[in-house]
Image: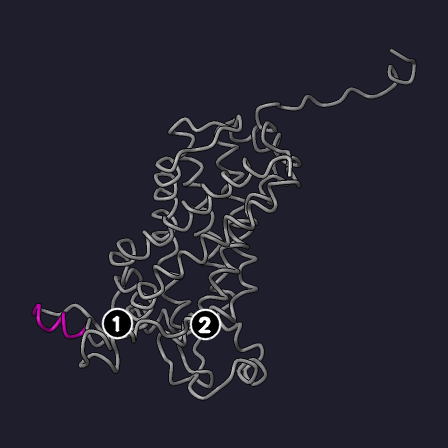
Amino acid sequence: MTAAAKDLPPQPAISAPILATSSVHMSGTAEARLMGSAVAGVSELMLFHPVDTIAKRIMTTESRLVVSSISGTAGNLNAAVFKESAGAGLGTKFGSLFPGIGFGAVYKILQRVYKFGGQPVLKDWMRIRYGQSFEAAFGHNGAATMLSATSGALIGIGEVVLLPLDALKVKAQTAPEQLKGRGVVAIFRTEGWSLYRGAGWTVARNAPGSFALFGGNKAAKIMMGVGEDGQRATWMQDAISSCAGATASIMVAQPLDIVKTRIQSRAFNSPESGVSIITNLLKNEGPGALFKGLTPKLMVVGPKLVFSFTVAQHLIGYFTTTMKGF
C-alpha cells in the first residue's frame, strides 16, 4: 500500500445486497423498458378502453345509481353508462363506449412508457445514492419495498405533465358535446392552462396511488421469494404481484380519483373547486360516494392495470435479457 493510500480517510462500507441490481445496462435496459412499456400501453388501450369509459361515466354521475328496486337501479346504470345511446340497440351501445379513442391512445401510451419505463430508472438512481440510508432505516427487504414505492410516488407526481391529454380523454368519454366541432389545436389554443385544472388533486391522487402500486408489487414479489440476483419472475409471479399492487393502488386513490374525474368532466367555462365538489358530494350523496364505483372498478379497471403492469414487467425483463450484447 502506498503512502498516499494510507493517508486516505476510511470509506464507508457498501452494502452489497442493496446494490446488487443497481447497474443500468445502457445497451439493453433502456430500450427494453421503452419497448416493454409501450407494448403494454397499446395492448391495454385495445382491450380496455370501453371498460375505462364505463368507469369514468359511473364516477361522474352525480345522482344515486342504486335505488330500492332492481329495475330502477338497472335503468339508472343504463342511462349513466350509455348516455344518449341508452335506448339504442346493442351494437350502437357498444360503439358509444369508444369516444376519445384518439386522446386515449396518445395519453395511455405516453403514460405507460413514462410510468412503467421511468420508475425502474428512478429506482436504480435512488438505490445507488440512497440505498444504504433506506436499508439502515427499513432493513434489506423493507428498503427494497420502500425504494420501489417512493420512486413510484415521485413518478406518479410527475405524471401530472400529461394531465391535458387525460382531461380531454375524460371529457370525450363523459361529456363529448364539449369537444364537438373543435380541433385539438384549437382546444389547446383556446383553453390553455385550464386544461391543467385539478392538477393539485391529480398529484394528491397519483402520489399515494403509485406508492401503493409499486410498493405492493415489490412486497408481493419479496413474499414469493423473487430475489434481487437477476432472475426473472415468471408470468404467474408478475401477475400475482401486479394484482397486489393494483388492488392497493385503486383502493388508496379512489376518493381522490372521484374528485379528479369530476373536475375534469365539467365544462371548460364552468369550473368547480375540489373542496366544493367534496362538500356537495357529502351533502347530496353521502360519505359512501367517495368510494362510488369502487367495486366495479376493482372488477373491471383492476384487471386493466394488472394486465398492463404484468405485460410491462415481464416484457421489460424479456427484452433486457434478449437484448444484452446488442
Q: Position of residue 17 (x, y in %)?
A: 57, 24
Q: Is residue 265 above or below residue 239?
A: below
Q: Secondary structure at mark 1?
A: helix
Asked whether the viewer can see residue 80, the reply is no
Q: Classify mark 1: residues with Cα within 10 Å, few (<14), some (14-19) or many (20+).
A: few
Q: Which residue is identified by label 1?
A: 94
The reply, left or right, for residue 267 in relation to residue 7 is left
Residue 290 image label: none
User: Residue at (40%, 61%) from the top-left corner?
Assistant: 45
The reply, left or right, for residue 229 in relation to residue 169 is right
The image quadrant where one finds the N terminus is top right
Answer whether residue 71 is magenta in the image.
Answer: yes
Q: Position of residue 242 (x, y in %)?
A: 38, 43
Q: Which residue is farthest front?
A: 326
Asked whether the viewer can see residue 5, the reply is yes
Amino acid marked by disc 2: Gly
What's the CA distance linking mark 1 and mark 2? 17 Å
Answer whether residue 72 is magenta in the image.
Answer: yes
Q: Is residue 78 above or below residue 157?
A: below
The reply, left or right, for residue 156 in relation to residue 240 is right
- Give the colour scheme of this rendering: one colour
Q: Position of residue 320 (x, y in %)?
A: 55, 39
Q: Secondary structure at mark 2?
A: helix
Foreground of the two, 119 or 282 = 119
The answer to whether the residues at label 1 and label 2 have Cβ atoms under 8 Å apart is no
User: Residue at (26%, 54%) from the top-left corner?
Assistant: 299
User: Residue at (32%, 74%) from the top-left corner?
Assistant: 280
Residue 102 image label: 2
Amino acid marked by disc 1: Phe
Q: Position of residue 126 (x, y in %)?
A: 62, 40
Q: Is residue 324 above or below residue 309?
A: above
* First to last magenta residue range: 69-76
